[in-house]
Structures are given as structure tokens and as C-alpha cells.
């Protein structure tokens, strides 16, 4: 695996087949990544039921274009993902997401199948530094290769969600909540994501940044026209470059910093060769960041911090999820997705117990009605970075 990231400008999705082909050709051609008869999982970002213009999911035209190139090599592509942790991993859930996201129509047009197998398999990964056992969806377990087709988005918990974070979707539905419950600080969660990315080892990583998401992503941010396609054999390298384009300081990205701690390369832009578009020309100077916590002070393991300062820091220095009652329809997605059972129904509306809330923002991320708002204290507003 080399430390190269390829960038092609693509102003709109009408040009996706031409531009995607150009990107893959820069990388050596699809024959380098897909062989005759191979089962290839096209691992999209299908977080929740959302229309393409909302920029929540990988655009269906990107998935179809990649799948079409793989089919020309004689491979058998399959679109697969498990939605966010508040959604049950069922065929009914998948069908709703496939239809609303436009994935089903694009797949049918391109002659590609969509996955409806909702079983999963336990796997062991002895080389994992933090996590040595995973439960992954069956089509990924059975695939010859995984193509990681992610979306450029901000993220309230991990700052950005790109190639490494997208791989979390191989964990089935509600099982994701268990990882949030056990690993509710960003450093440990990032470590798990890196272990998982190394286990899955996607053969090809392509980022849809034609229409990205800024602000309070990954499910309720604002669409932002960026007009790019990015590709790499290394998901970490892809995220380093994407972070540069989004203007995210690497020291604020828990995945990049955990990679540095583990001596995983590349974790700096200086270690990466960018091919295609000039990086300086495609940076977005005013890309809006998510509202995030003030960050770790490295004190979480100390008993005195847990007893005295942690409650204060949790309330004063973090953004709190809060229910917008007139939008809530009591669908219970937030209840299903909360890893610590901090959400319940009160008077037929969701209610978040702030004392139990661990600030993972799963409820905000998953709410189909955008009925979970974000509230920050005056002290947080005063001290947060500009």
C-alpha cells in the first residue's frame, strides 16, 4: 500500500461516470482492484433514510459508477452497509434507505445488486491493539474485497467522518451502540476504528466530496458544494488529505492523533503524495466545523477527576443534545440508538436524561426528523475555538 491520494475535480453528479473513470485510471485502472469472478462489497455510507441532496449518504451515482467499472472487469459488486446504531438491521430498514437515498434505482440501472442479508458473523483480530473481536455483516465477511465508498462530512463525535469512520458501518445496526457505550471517549473510539479499518483492509477507498456536509454532521449538517472526488488505497491517507481540504487541524482529529500515537503512517500531509488536482487549489477555507467538546485533557483515568471535575466539564464544556418537541414524532429511533439508555418517552415525546448522557451524539446523528437540537453553555461559547 502506498501513501498516494488522488484528487479529481467533479463539479456535479451529471459528470460522475467520466470523472470517476478518470480518478480510477489515475490510480492504475479498475483492473488493479477488481478481478474476474471476485465478490466485491461496495461499502457505501448509508447512515439513515435520506435523499441524495441532503448529503447524508454516499451519492448513488458514485456507487453505480464504481460498480459499473468493477462489472466490466468481470467482478460481482454488491452494495452493502449497516445503518446507524438507532436502526434495526432488517431488510425493511434497508429497503427504505435504498429507496429514499436513490441507491435502489441507481443499482437497478447499473445492473448491481443491493444486499438484503441481515445476518452477521463474529470475527477475531489478534493484531488489534484495543479491539480483538468484532461482529461484522455477512456480505463483508464473505467478500473477496471491500471498496470503501465514503462521504466527506463533519461529525460531532469524531470531528470528521471519512474513510476510516465509514468502515464502522460493517458493524450490524444496534451492535454499534455497544461500542459507543464501552468507548465513550474519542481516543478509545478512534482506536477501535483503526483496529477495524486494519482488519477490513479495504482494497479501494473513494470519497464522494462532490456534495459534502458541513456543520453538525454526520446526519443533520448542511450540504456544501465542494466538487471533488478523492481516491486512495489507504483510508488513513485519504482522511489526512480530506481533513486538509476541510480545514480541520490534525491535532483536533482523534483518528489522526491516535494513528500518530500508534506510529501508523501516513498521519501527516507531508508524508502523502497528492496526485491530480493541486491540494492548495481545492482547499475550502470556510468549511463549517461541527460543534464539538473542548477535548480531552488526559485526566479521564484519575479518580479525583471522575468525581469532581468530570461532571463540571461534561456540563460546561460540551454540547448537549436536546429534544425539539414540536418536531419529535416519538419514532423511538433515538431510544434504540442510545448506548446508555439515556433517552426515554415522556408525554409521547423523547426526553434525554442529561445525567446519563455521555455526549456521543448518536441521537442527533440518527434522528430522521432532525428533532434533536444542540445546546451549549455560555462558558462553552466563550471558550470554544473560533
Image (tube, grey):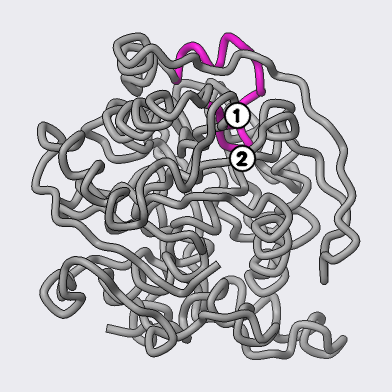
Looking at the rendering, which quadrant does residue 197 occupy? bottom right
| Mark 1 residue crowding within 10 angstroms, few (<14) / some (14–19) / many (20+) | some
Q: Are marks 1 and 2 in contact (CB under 8 Å)?
A: yes
Q: Nearer the viewer, residue 368 or 130?
A: 130
Q: Which of pointers 1 and 2 lies earlier in the amino acid sequence? A: 1
Please provide percent x and percent y for residue 112.
Answer: 43, 16
Res 178 seen here: yes
**Residue 347 placement, left or right of 103:** right
Residue located at (57% from left, 46% from top): 362
Q: Is residue 103 magenta?
A: no
Res 326 seen here: no
Q: Which residue is mark 1?
A: 38
Magenta part of the chain = 80-97
| Mark 2 residue crowding within 10 angstroms, few (<14) / some (14–19) / many (20+) | many
Residue located at (54% from left, 59% from top): 164
Q: Nearer the viewer, residue 323 or 110?
A: 110
Q: Which residue is mark 2?
A: 145
Q: The residue tagged with tag 2: helix, strand or loop? A: strand
Looking at the rendering, which quadrant does residue 38 occupy? top right
Looking at the rendering, which quadrant does residue 315 occupy? bottom right
Amino acid at each position: 500500500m502506498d501513501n498516494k491520494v488522488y484528487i479529481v475535480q467533479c463539479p456535479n453528479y451529471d459528470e460522475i461516470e467520466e470523472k470517476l473513470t478518470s480518478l480510477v485510471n489515475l490510480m492504475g485502472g479498475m483492473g488493479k482492484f477488481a478481478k474476474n469472478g471476485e465478490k466485491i462489497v461496495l461499502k457505501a455510507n448509508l447512515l439513515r433514510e435520506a435523499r441524495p441532496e441532503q448529503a447524508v449518504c454516499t451519492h448513488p451515482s458514485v456507487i453505480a459508477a464504481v460498480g459499473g467499472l468493477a462489472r466490466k472487469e468481470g467482478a460481482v459488486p454488491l452494495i452493502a452497509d449497516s445503518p446507524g446504531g438507532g436502526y434495526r438491521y432488517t431488510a425493511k430498514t434497508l429497503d427504505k434507505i435504498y429507496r429514499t437515498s436513490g441507491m435502489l434505482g441507481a443499482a437497478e440501472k447499473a445492473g448491481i445488486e443491493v444486499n438484503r442479508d441481515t445476518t452477521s458473523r463474529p470475527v477475531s483480530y489478534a493484531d488489534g491493539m484495543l479491539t480483538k473481536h468484532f461482529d461484522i455483516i455477512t456480505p463483508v465477511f464473505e467478500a473477496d474485497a471491500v471498496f470503501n465508498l465514503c462521504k466527506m462530512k463533519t461529525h460531532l463525535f469524531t470531528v470528521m467522518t471519512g474513510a476510516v469512520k465509514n468502515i464502522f458501518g460493517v458493524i450490524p445496526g444496534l451492535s454499534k451502540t455497544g461500542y459507543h457505550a464501552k468507548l465513550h471517549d474519542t481516543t478509545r473510539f478512534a482506536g477501535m476504528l483503526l483496529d477495524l479499518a486494519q482488519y477490513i483492509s479495504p482494497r479501494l477507498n473513494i470519497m464522494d466530496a462532490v456534495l459534502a456536509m458541513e456543520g453538525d454532521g454526520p446526519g443533520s449538517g448542511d450540504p456544501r458544494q465542494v466538487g471533488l472526488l478523492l481516491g486512495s488505497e489507504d483510508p488513513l491517507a485519504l482522511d489526512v488529505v480530506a481533513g486538509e481540504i476541510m480545514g480541520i487541524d490534525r491535532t483536533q482529529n482523534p483518528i489522526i492523533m491516535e494513528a500518530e500515537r500508534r506510529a501508523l503512517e501516513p498521519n501527516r500531509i507531508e508524508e502523502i503524495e497528492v496526485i491530480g488536482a493541486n491540494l492548495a487549489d481545492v482547499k475550502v477555507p470556510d468549511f463549517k466545523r461541527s460543534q464539538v467538546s473542548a477535548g480531552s485533557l488526559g485526566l479521564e483515568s484519575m479518580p479525583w477527576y471522575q468525581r469532581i471535575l468530570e461532571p463540571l466539564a461534561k456540563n460546561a464544556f460540551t454540547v448537549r443534545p436536546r429534544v425539539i418537541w414540536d418536531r419529535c414524532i416519538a419514532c423511538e429511533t433515538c431510544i434504540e440508538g442510545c448506548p446508555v439508555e439515556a433517552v426515554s418517552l415522556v408525554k409521547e415525546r423523547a426526553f434525554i436524561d442529561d445525567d446519563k448522557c455521555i455526549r456521543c451524539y448518536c441521537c442527533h446523528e440518527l434522528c430522521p426528523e432532525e428533532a434533536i437540537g444542540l445546546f451549549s453553555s455560555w462558558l462553552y461559547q466563550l471558550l470554544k475555538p473560533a
